[in-house]
Amino acid sequence: MGENENIIDFNLPKNQSSVIKVIGIGGGGGNAINYMYKNGIKGVDFAVCNTDTQALEASPIPVKIQLGESLTNGLGAGSNPQVGKEAAMESIDRINELLDSNTNMLFITAGMGGGTGTGAAPVIAKAARDKGILTVGVVTMPFETEGGRRHDHAKLGLEELRANVDTLLVINNQKLLEVHGDLKLRQAFSKANEVLNTATKGIAEVITQHLTVNIDLSDARLVLQDSGTAIMGQAEAEGENRAVEAVKNALDSPLLNDNDIFGSKHVLLKIVTGDSEEDEISMNELKLITDTIQKQAGNNVNIINGVGTDPALGSKLSVTVIATGFDVKEEEVEVVISIGEDETLDSISKPKKKQDSNPKSLSEDFSQQSMFDFEEDFQINFTEEEITEEEIIERDVEDDIPSTHEENRVVLLLDDEIDEDLEPMDTSIDDEEENSQEVDLSFNTDQIEEEVEEEFVFRDRVKINPEELEENEIASRKREEKLKNISNILRTPSGLTNLIEEPAFKRNGIDLDDVPHSSESDISSQTLSLGEDNVIQLKQNNSFLHDNVD
């Protein structure tokens, strides 16, 4: 037997593709994955999917999948998410072939708001999750300059993707401008790719990087599977207080959509230092980091630690925090019921109830109709009168309902004018209570009907110009982002210091270079006026009154 005959070739999973794959979908996802591929992420395989063949040919990624060849002819989705969705469904066999090649974990990167990424990402995520693959979405929300329509597409696509992934990381591109200031166009999108790379690499290398205290894929599955929204932060620090600074900076990451880890149930914590004995983390530093996370997240959080070394860090300490398991916050939905001019409360209330002559029950019926949005100062005052049982039995409900057959019936209201020729009514003591009771009941009913009619008129506000509504939404988003930015700045010690030291006129962008000196005045020191005989005279102003005194 020759020497070569003793060699047996085993087809081990180790020699096949990586169990962790990163797929970039669409234009934004493709640009991000190109950036990741050039910078490198340990232990992952890359693939790119797009409906645009030109973008696929320009990508350095070796594994490429063209979506919807017959549907789009390689010309893209035209910013239509529905086309992107149908293109992914057309090419689902090729996607399944990629996912079946030894895949245990999948990262999906995409830019929300376009056509291919917004429409195809949920389809690919669902295909992976149906196979039991741990699926993590890392996506960006568009800049405000990209328009309201793109924002609407992004929100719808984000919710659909959220329902088909185990974990979702959302990166708000608008925060790039708030953190880094006014950027050039290519710089802004390059920063977005950098943040996507940081988030994806941070999660992937928590699993793939070999650590002294290791975190494996089972730990990651425990934290990330069916966890919903995730928050991730990463930071480095050096010096005597490096542990506290690193963990605080990691928790104060301003680029993610949210950075508050309070209420999370699971946290993956990776700590890496230099490999020398002096640079290695101490037990006291480890305690400081875990105590800080415990305090920020709450006492019920489960922290899974991974601790290792990297010679490239030197004296620095690197902290990566991934928090998941947040309770879903349900948004309050305002319910508005449109009422026509001919409709009344009885016609829209469900179920319909028979009218009761008892004022107390009438007040209870109106108090239960919470679907009407009355103003705070709106009050309905009811007067309650004691009614004997005998009177309740004698009084029929139908007597209060106007009938067209009763031609001779006279209804008196408070607003009606009284004829002077009418004879005065003799009100005796015996029937005074009954008369006052009938007047009070009529008055209360008229008051309620009058106030409700005013509310119907107020509901005309539903007719809103769509353009004005879009402008209001953009202004509201800008205000919300501005407030969040201020909150993020105040959370960091350096941000608070800069806010205090920077003058207000600089923060507001006011230029003081061309301000005229206080001795200069743009008001003339002479005036024209009419003197005697209507002759125009040139008068000198009083310098003590009109000139600056300084």
Image (cartoon, grey):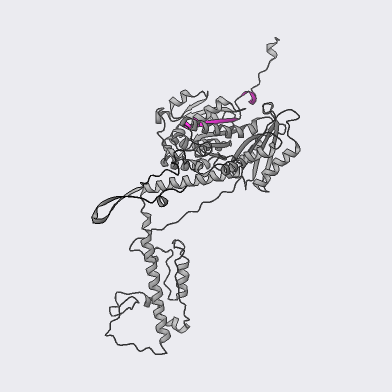
Q: Is residue 42 above or below residue 173?
A: above
Identify the residue at horizontal 42%, vertical 57% (top origin). 336
Q: Is residue 399 left or right of residue 169?
A: left
Q: Is residue 14 magenta?
A: yes
User: With respect to residue 15, does 431 lie above or below?
Assistant: below
Outermost residue toward the left in this view:
533
Q: Is residue 307 visible?
A: yes
* 4 magenta-colored: no
Front residue (pair 46, 517): 517
Residue 76 rendering spot, x and y as whole percentages: 41, 30
Camera-nearest residue between 298 and 124: 298
**Whole-percent x, y for residue 226 in the image:** 59, 42
Residue pushed farthest top? 2
Picture layout, residue 8 above or below residue 278: above
How many discs appear? 0
- Magenta region: 9-30
Percent coordinates x, y for residue 531 in the rendering: 27, 54
Residue 163 in sight in this render: no
Residue 288, picture quadrant:
top right
Q: Give the quarter of the figure containing the N terminus.
A: top right
Q: Residue at x 59, y 33 (%)?
A: 105
Describe residue 439's horizontal placement relative to residue 192 as left or right: left
How far across and how far down the image is residue 211, in percent? Answer: 70, 31
Taking depth in this image into account, of 385 and 182 the one nearest to the observer is 182
Q: Is residue 26 above or below residue 154?
A: above
